[in-house]
Image (tube, coloured by chain):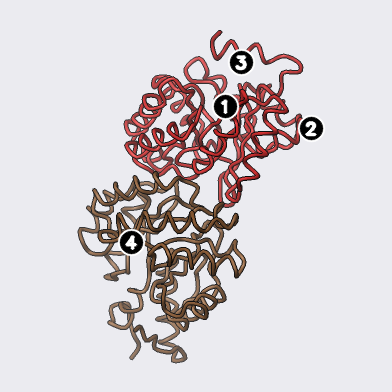
Chain colours: A red, B brown
Amino acid sequence: MTEMELLNRSKTPGGLPQLLIYSNLEVDAGISDIKLTCMEAEKLDIPRILVNPVNVSLAAKNCTNSKVKVGAALSYPVGTFPAEIKGYEIEDAIQNGADEIYMLMALGVFLDGFYDDIQKEMEVLVEKAGKLPTYYMIETSAVYKDHLARICLMAKLSGLDFIVSSTNFKPGGYLPATIEEVKYMAECEETGPAVVAHGDFKTRRQVEDYLNAGASRVCTPHAAKLLG
Amino acid sequence: MGISRESKEVKDFAALFHYGTLGIDKTTRHLRQDIARVLESGFTFKAYNVEMTLAVLTKELLNGRMRIHIPISYPLGNMTTRKKQLDLVYCQKIGIDESCVCLNYGAIVSHQYELIEREVRALTDEFETEIELAFVIQAALLNDIEIVDVSKAIGYGGGSRIKLNTGYGWGTSPEEVGLLRRVFGYTFDLHPSGNITSLQQVKQFLSLGVTNIHSLAAFEIIDEYIAERNAGFGEFVRID
């Protein structure tokens, strides 16, 4: 069964946990916080968590005996690194036990119009991640609508699996993508990869709104609480 | 007769500052505009701070006019030590003069100071001879004991420069600098950073023996200094 078929199958009543990614990108997350994230994800049947690179190794150890996949948020939250550095960072994360690779776009490079460089970093992500699922993280609210279509197309050409709509970094970060922006990106699915809505979503209703807009998955630091 | 931007006194004052083009949305257009302004001013800042993706162009545009400084693992050090090493290898390769490395904030607030010491040692041992390293502790988010303990760990690891905050909404207070001066004297070269926008703040830091000020408002502060001096009520800032 393909990743997309799995996603479609899980879009059924009662399947909400399967569509969630439980993020713990808190900068002060300690050992006990990461262990708790792993434990809650397993207990609530949330299949994926997302953590900072420095916590990948710990999370991987704590998820060894569960089905929970550990995602590594690389180049997070700035993304301002050359592609070759991003490639090394992916290798490092895989060595530390990451099951899924998230990589943040070099926003300034994109806004500069250096699309070849962006294409290159996407390709590095796909190549270095190998068989692991790839998530390309962008700041939707920092780009124009026609930029989104371009990003989706480039991502598709590069073979990326998912686009993540925002970093949800605070303070000083960008706003999360709106429902309309996610819908627009999802409509580009013909030309682009599946969309993950990422934000500070605290209620089931918010999550369902993004899923109804076409997001394939929703990533939130409140995944456990909203299921509880 | 008053002082002007061209005077030695003002140029010496400007030389206290780290200025630059920082932010994830900064493009080559922003960089070119900022550097043109710097070159036109005739100021030689202590260093020009820039994101890694813009480093090569910065080097080309400044053409040796001033040192280049790259921040690493911003803003809270959540990258692995290995990644920080890889970033510094890249900086070394392209000839960067100095860097500030954010220490793992999660480790600091978990009081895992041995991890901090190990990271500082790994980086200073490998890079200090070629790249001047400052370590960022994000003091605004720590209590006094944590500020002191993480600074001790930096010292044990061989670090000698502490940048107190990153910006990103977190700024350095004179109290934080004063605390480190009281406890450690002049063991560390202290670099205030974040939300420094006025001459009054700069004067407070200078009175605490600071000689490195990170501020994206450097031009505005310099203009404030000139205006104050020319109004006849400002004091000459002696820089030792």
Residue with the mark numbered 1:
A69
Residue with the mark numbered 2:
A228
Horizontal relation, residue B102 to residue B3: left or right: right
Q: What residue type is labelled 1?
A: Lys
A216 or B91, nearer to the observer: B91
Query: What's the chain of the residue with tag 1?
Result: A
Residue with the mark numbered 3:
A7
Q: Is residue B43 visible?
A: yes
Label 3: which secondary element: helix
Q: Earlier in the sequence, mark 3 or mark 2?
A: 3
Residue with the mark numbered 4:
B48
Q: What residue type is labelled 2?
A: Gly
Query: Badges 1 and 4: C-beta atoms under 8 Å apart?
Result: no
Cα distance in 3D space between marks 3 and 2: 22 Å
- Rate crowding at label 2 as few (under 14), some (14 to 19) or many (20 or more) other CA atoms within 10 Å: few
Cα distance in 3D space between marks 2 and 4: 50 Å
Query: What's the chain of the residue with tag 2?
Result: A
Residue A196 position in % (x across, y down): 58, 27
Q: Is residue A30 above or below residue A156?
A: below
Judge depth for marks 1 and 4 and give the one in front: 1
- Rate crowding at label 1 as few (under 14), some (14 to 19) or many (20 or more) other CA atoms within 10 Å: many
